[in-house]
Amino acid sequence: DAMVIQNPRYQVTQFGKPVTLSCSQTLNHNVMYWYQQKSSQAPKLLFHYYDKDFNNEADTPDNFQSRRPNTSFCFLDIRSPGLGDAAMYLCATSREAGSLNYGYTFGSGTRLTVV
Amino acid sequence: QKEVEQNSGPLSVPEGAIASLNCTYSDRGSQSFFWYRQYSGKSPELIMFIYSNGDKEDGRFTAQLNKASQYVSLLIRDSQPSDSATYLCAVYNQGGKLIFGQGTELSVKP
């Protein structure tokens, strides 16, 4: 089945130790997104790629970076995780940006714990 | 003012009742509106989308949109315990971004 896959499901990292979360998709969607969701809060958009074009949200900390080496894969790099970065990280895709009728397809998420 | 606002709940309804979930949004130019269901520790799952004023029905779910009032709602008929989850309202705004509300926790009691 076509889907969005995130690895790992659970990630524990040490304070200040760089960590990378991965996302892959078999939907051949042009747009990939990274959201951060803290407990009992709305998912918050960090950035998105339209094809190879990177779009950063204005309030996304510099500590967060992203790479999209090809259509199928997208990575979230946290250079120096702090305790406040503990959250669920959600990868999502959409066929096109500005699609009226299509919601995003989400991966299963990666729960990040910082110790 | 948040772009998308929902009552956080929890909203508790008995099994078989109608659950009514509400959402308001601030960007008057928004065109598309989505309801996602999120079980605890899981990722959001799309339930319905709506983009025209009025009602849209899909099985036990009905989405209602009133653009003049900047209001969208989700009705769940014949609520089941398996419907217990957090329901996220999401709005596709003029900036081309999907903005989420914080979600309403629904609890359906047997």
Image (cartoon, coloured by chain):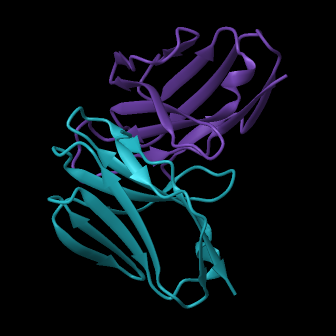
Chain colours: A purple, B cyan
Residue visible at 50% across and 88% down?
B78
Rendered image quadrant of residue B47: bottom left
Q: Position of residue A13 (x, y in %)?
A: 80, 21
Left/right of residue B21 with respect to residue B62 in the rendered view: right
| Nearer to us in this view, B100 or B68 | B68
Expressed as whole percent of the image width and height from the top left, the position of residue B88 reads 47, 55
Please give the count of numbered marks on the rendered protein: 0
Q: Is residue A26 left or right of residue B23?
A: right
Q: Is residue B52 above or below residue A11?
A: below
Residue A84 lies left or right of residue B73; in this view the side is right
Note whether B13 is above or below A63 in the view shown: below
- Most foreground residue, A51 or A54: A54
Residue with the most extreme front position: B1
Q: Quadrant of the C terminus of chain B?
A: bottom right
Q: Please identify the quarter of the rendering in which residue A95 is found.
A: top left
Q: What residue sits 25% from the left and 40% below the top? A: B93
State the image coordinates of residue B31 (x, y, percent, origin top left). 19, 49
Taking depth in this image into account, of B78 and B58 the one nearest to the observer is: B78
The relative height of residue B4 versus residue B10 in the rendered view (above or below) is above
Residue B101's x, y, as percent?
A: 44, 48
The quarter of the image holding the N terminus of chain B is top left
Report the residue at 26% width, 74% height from top. Answer: B56
Q: Residue at x 34, y 41 (%)?
A: B3
Name the side, left or right, on which B30 lies relative to B3.
left
